[in-house]
Image (cartoon, rainbow, N blue to C red):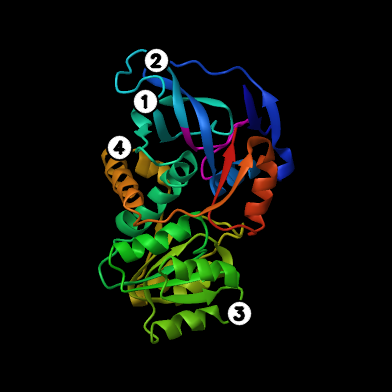
């Protein structure tokens, strides 16, 4: 089968297409013929050797796929050949086929296409649990969503409103991206390329600050975000897209009873009951057209390097998808 992998860490150019042996289904597994692959910042971090956990070489990225069950291993009774499913896997998604734990599969609702479905699990679960499990959102609170036109951000804007946020403040780097955030339900728009973006956030809250901030840039964005928080505010960290880790003085959180909370989706995935409930809720929202999934582009598998470059160059909005 065809796959995309890298044998050394580096820029998008280290990604290469290769022919490898198709996997076989072991006990409790199925083999999927992949129909769509979600591209995520975790993939680029893996490629750079900068992921939260070590990345062995050679490595095939890709944690989010939809596909059709091609082969069923021993002990699997819930699925059969021909079933359409979506799943999250540890790695190996940039390929034509993948072996996956049958317990991780979620059947696709009838009428939901592959591209839409693959845009949901990783970033949908991330947005959902950033706000609920980690952010502990309460009705009427003000939420600051950075990179609000991105895969996670565009869903977080909508889910914050769904969970009862009184005000959602969206940041992005261009007017086009801000327009998308507005369309998705944001109440206030802030271009964070402006040096005074923090003042704009404070003006939108009448000087009170925000209750929850979803932060994935790091560096100066993190420090300015801390200054935007009101008492008992929660900053939930889920990435360092700028590549610039932030230094923090913990005692500086004391005077406003602030919380800085880390989020890593694989830890959520270790709680199947939590995942199943939230993903079912997300799928139901999509089916009822109460959650809009923004697909930023669909590319051939061989274009993975191009897609990584576009994503890291912040030249896209919404979910980027590869097709074998």
Disc 2 designates what residue? Answer: 73
State whether residue 219 is above or below residue 268: below
Disc 3 designates what residue? Answer: 195
Q: Nearer the viewer, mark 2 or mark 4?
A: 2
**Bounds of the magenta span?**
49-66
> Does label 1 or label 2 sit earlier along the sequence?
2
State whether residue 164 is above or below residue 53: below
Q: How many residues crowd mark 3 within 10 Å: few (<14), some (14–19), many (20+)?
A: few
> Does label 1 or label 3 sit earlier along the sequence?
1
Residue 52 among magenta residues: yes
Which secondary structure dominates the residues rendered in magenta?
loop
Residue 101 among magenta residues: no
Marking on residue 102: 1
Tag 1 secondary structure = helix
Tag 4 secondary structure = helix
State whether residue 210 is above or below residue 47: below
Q: Position of residue 278 (x, y in %)?
A: 30, 47
> Does label 2 or label 4 sit earlier along the sequence?
2
């Amino acid at each position: 089968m065809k796959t995309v992998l890298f044998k050394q860490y580096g820029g998008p150019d280290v990604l290469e297409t290769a022919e490898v042996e198709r996997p076989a289904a072991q006990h409790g597994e199925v083999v999927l013929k992949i129909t769509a692959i979600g591209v995520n910042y975790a993939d680029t971090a893996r490629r750079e050797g900068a992921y939260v956990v070590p990345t062995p070489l050679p490595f095939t990225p890709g944690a989010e796929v939809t596909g059709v069950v091609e082969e069923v291993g021993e002990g699997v009774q819930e699925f059969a050949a021909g079933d359409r499913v979506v799943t999250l896997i540890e790695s190996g998604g940039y390929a034509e086929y993948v072996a996956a734990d049958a317990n991780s599969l979620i059947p696709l609702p009838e009428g939901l296409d592959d591209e839409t479905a693959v845009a949901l699990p990783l970033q949908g679960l991330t947005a959902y649990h950033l706000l609920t499990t980690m952010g502990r959102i309460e009705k009427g609170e003000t939420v600051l969503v950075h990179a609000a036109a991105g895969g996670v951000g565009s869903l977080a804007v909508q889910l914050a409103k769904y969970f009862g946020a009184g005000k959602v403040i969206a940041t992005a780097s261009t007017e086009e991206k801000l327009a998308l955030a507005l369309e998705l339900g944001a109440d206030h728009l802030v271009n964070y390329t402006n040096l005074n973006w923090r003042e704009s956030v404070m003006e939108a809250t009448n000087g009170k600050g925000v209750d929850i901030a979803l932060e994935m840039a790091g560096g100066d964005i993190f420090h300015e975000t801390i200054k935007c928080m009101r008492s008992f505010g929660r900053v939930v960290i889920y990435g360092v897209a700028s590549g610039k880790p932030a230094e923090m003085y913990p005692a500086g959180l004391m005077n406003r009873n602030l919380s800085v909370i880390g989020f890593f989706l694989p830890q959520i995935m270790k709680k199947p009951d939590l995942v199943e409930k939230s993903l079912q809720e997300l799928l139901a929202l999509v089916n009822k057209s109460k959650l809009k999934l923004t697909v930023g582009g669909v590319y051939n598998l061989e274009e993975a390097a191009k897609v990584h470059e576009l994503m890291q160059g912040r030249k896209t909005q919404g979910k980027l998808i590869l097709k074998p």
